[in-house]
Amino acid sequence: MVTVELFLLNCIIIVSEVFMKGCYQMARPVVAIVGRPNVGKSTIFNRLAGSRIAIVEDKPGITRDRIYSSSEWLDQQFNIIDTGGIEINPDDPIIQLTKIQAELAIDEADVIIFVVDGQTGLTDVDKEIAQYLYRSQKPIVVAVNKLDNIEMLANLYEFYELNLGEPHAVSGAHGTGFGDLLDAVVVHFPQERVELSESDAIRVAVIGRPNVGKSSLVNAMLGEERVIVSDVAGTTRDAIDTFISTEDQDFVLVDTAGVRRRGKVYEKTEKYSVLRALKAIEESEVVLILIDGSEGIIEQDKKIAGYAHEAGRACIFVVNKWDIVEKDDKTMRQFETNIRNHFQFMTYAPILFLSAKTKSRLQHVLPTVVEVAESYATRIQTSVLNDVIFDAVALNPHPTVKGKRLKIGFSTQVAVKPPTFVIFVNDPEIMHFTYRRYLENKIREAFDFTGTPIHIIIRKKDDERL
């Protein structure tokens, strides 16, 4: 390979590592979308999310729980929350719960988009909500929705009466005005960074649905009652960082059991801890995904694990409460098989069985964390990587597609945490996803990537000889 190509590849590696490092050092800001019912919050949410995630219907009260997604503007990534409509002093119990959910979203948010209806005009409910939002002391950006054409822009000015700054005209239905709206939102994003690079400590997030024993596990690992433990779901008020040290390694444990409690509504809402878990995941390197061994796997477990997988973090499944499971010599193997069947997208993650209460098998946790953290930071020599890829192709060539054969050229690792590889081919469009998976499996067979996802990027190589 010529010197210029080597220089360019080194540049790719350096830039990619800086980018990936920044991804796990900065927790994404949170933007909550709030307002009274039927002003178009879900339509705006779908525009920002880039897909039709929230149900949109011209009927009040469709969105009841908070819905989460992510978005990006001017190279700044952030999480967004869609909420049910706020109604002041509602009598309907369901609407009361919806209002509480919106209040939770406001508590979790860094910035609030207050959506009002530009066609209906300013209402007394809008004014009351504005007063409530003002008391939250959070940055507020007013979005005047449904201003679908230029003739309607005059409706914008009455919303200055809210005294929440300059209102922004948008049309969720047509997608207009979002540039100015997002410009106003991102200026309020916090700039603090979590300087992980200053310490060799491994940051470990402990996540899971309510009452699976997250706080108990943290306390057992610490050897003291550092975190409040209760058998009532939702006891932990905030994510708590705790530093511990062994002879060979330092760790920072993050317990992410939930947000501030406001009565029993939290016990009925499995989504309440999502934002805290997301923040902890984004600031961590290794994630312990707790599963209640006495209850088995439920859908919420898969959603929570998916957050860690999509964030590209090293993962370990921890089956807790194993002491109260009725078992024989086949129970553990059957439970492990069940996990593999439910989490087929995370076959790389090791599985630990333990009891935080009795501390049985607890000694395996930190050594496994160290093992997967090392895999997470593994770099493969370029020549060795190419040998593995070429051997894999020779053993099982990609089938022809419409008479055209995929040709694989140079491969290189461009980042760690997670390990990320670029494979140059003659035509990325004809590579089937199953062949990408085949190459990933061959890489895993050749190198120890226990506990870590790996990313494979297919790029076109502009070389007629390829």
Image (spheres, grey):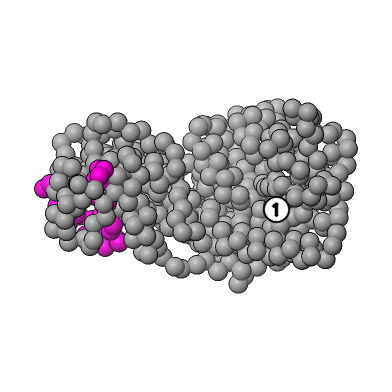
Please give left or right for residue 302 compared with residue 401 in the image.
Answer: left
The quarter of the image holding the C terminus is top right
Write the residue at 76% across / 44% down.
425
Please give left or right for residue 184 compared with residue 204 in the image.
Answer: left
Q: Amino acid at mark 1?
A: Pro
The crowding category of the residue bearing disc 1, from other C-alpha atoms within 10 Å (few below 14, some 14 to 19, many at least 20), is many
The quarter of the image holding the N terminus is bottom right
Q: Is residue 252 above or below residue 310?
A: below
| Residue range corresponding to the magenta coloring | 123-149
417 or 214, nearer to the observer: 417
The residue that disc 1 covers is 419
Q: Could you say which quadrant of the image residue 167 lies in?
A: bottom left
Write the residue at 72% across / 51% down.
421
x then y, percent, for residue 33: 32, 48
Write the residue at 81% across / 40% down.
407
x then y, percent, for residue 449: 74, 48
x then y, percent, for residue 143: 27, 51
- Judge whether residue 156 can be spotted in this image: yes
Q: Could you say which quadrant of the image residue 283 lies in?
A: bottom right
Q: Is residue 429 above or below residue 378?
A: above
